[in-house]
Image (cartoon, rainbow, N blue to C red):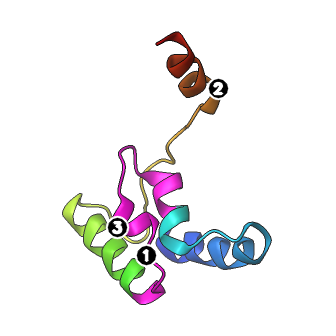
Amino acid sequence: MSFRCWLKNHYEQAPIDNLRLGQRFVNDFIKESWPELFYETNEYEAIHMIVMWLQHYHYHYDSLPQKVSRNITDDYNKEAMK
């Protein structure tokens, strides 16, 4: 999926699920915590942060990384086992 296609999908989904741009990118592609992007409200700044991340990790705009799979149930079970 290209960045442009992902961005188009974001703008189609945003009115429905109310996710911010950075929030959606973190949810889709980032395995670790990235609160600066997750909570960024300025879309231009969020795009800049995303572009810098893509360049840093050698991704191209026409080929984003695979989406991160998140299993909330597993996270919940890990916490319950403590």
CB contact under 8 Å: marks 1 and 2: no
> Is residue 49 shown in magenta?
no
Query: Quick check: 70 left or right of 29?
Result: right
Q: CA distance from mark 1 to mark 2?
A: 27 Å
Q: CA distance from mark 3 to mark 1?
A: 6 Å
Q: Which residues are magenta?
A: 25-44
CB contact under 8 Å: marks 3 and 1: yes
**Which residue is depicted at the point 49% across and 43% down?**
68
Identity of the amino acid at label 2? Thr
Residue 24 placed where, x, y %?
55, 63
Q: Earlier in the sequence, mark 1 or mark 2?
A: 1
**Which residue is depicted at the point 66% across and 71% down?**
9
Residue 74 placed where, x, y %?
58, 22
**Which residue is depicted at the point 35% across and 57% down?**
34
Q: Which mark is residue 36?
A: 3
Residue 27 placed where, x, y %?
52, 53
Q: Which mark is residue 73?
A: 2
**Which residue is depicted at the point 26% across and 73% down?**
52
> Of helix, strand and loop, which one carries label 3?
helix
| Mark 2 crowd level (few <14, some 14–19, many ≥20, 10 Å Cα) | few
The residue that mark 1 highlights is: 40
> Of helix, strand and loop, which one carries label 1?
loop
Identity of the amino acid at label 3? Glu
| Mark 1 crowd level (few <14, some 14–19, many ≥20, 10 Å Cα) | some
